[in-house]
Amino acid sequence: MDQALVDLRCPPQKVRIHHLGVDVKRIRFIPRQIQEGKPVCILMFSSFGEEKEIHFGIEMSAAGIPVIANHHCDIPNVIIDGETGLLAPERDVQALTEVILTLASSPDSWILMGKAGCKRIEKEFDCIKQVLRLEKIYKEFI
């Protein structure tokens, strides 16, 4: 997102990106694994057209659910490809299919991605930390 602003000729030293935050203490982390006879949850989202979509992606990642998304807008800043989830190019059905099949056939990666996603959300998207970061940004301009 910050590069998009620079590309629009915003001076890099003036760019400040502030992520949305969630109350990570209210989200229960559950390591995802195959359980005989139970469905497997994988979250897939492709845009931030509505605010609730990004919150849903952040919350599911914090809960340990593997997330599949595409390279759209700020999604790659939330979901780190191959680490906290998997990303596919926009409007590429074949690539999206391959990403889904890759995750579905790699249950060992679910726990690793889930833990990494949870840690990332706790570090970058915790609402308390975000308030403190936003306060610091405001103070820069006062």
Image: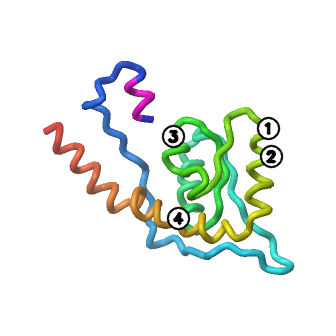
The CA distance from mark 1 to mark 3 is 20 Å
Whichever of labels 2 and 4 marks the residue nearer the N terminus, that label is 2
For the record, the magenta segment spans 2-6
For mark 1, what is the residue? 93
For mark 3, what is the residue? 74
The CA distance from mark 3 to mark 2 is 21 Å
For mark 4, what is the residue? 116
Residue 48 in the image, given as x and y percentages of width and height: 58, 41
Whichever of labels 3 and 4 marks the residue nearer the N terminus, that label is 3
Question: Which is nearer the eye, 43 or 100?
Answer: 100
Residue 96 in the image, given as x and y percentages of width and height: 75, 44
Question: Which is nearer the eye, 40 or 95?
Answer: 95
- Please tell me how crowded label 2 is: few (under 14), some (14-19), or many (20+) other residues with Cα within 10 Å: few
- CB atoms at circles 2 and 1 under 8 Å apart? yes
- CB atoms at circles 3 and 4 under 8 Å apart? no
The amino acid marked with disc number 2 is Thr
Question: Which is nearer the eye, 44 or 142?
Answer: 44
Residue drawn 57% across and 61% down? 61
Whichever of labels 1 and 3 marks the residue nearer the N terminus, that label is 3
Q: Secondary structure at mark 1?
A: helix
The amino acid marked with disc number 1 is Val
Picture quarter containing residue 64? Answer: bottom right
Residue drawn 67% across and 67% down? 110
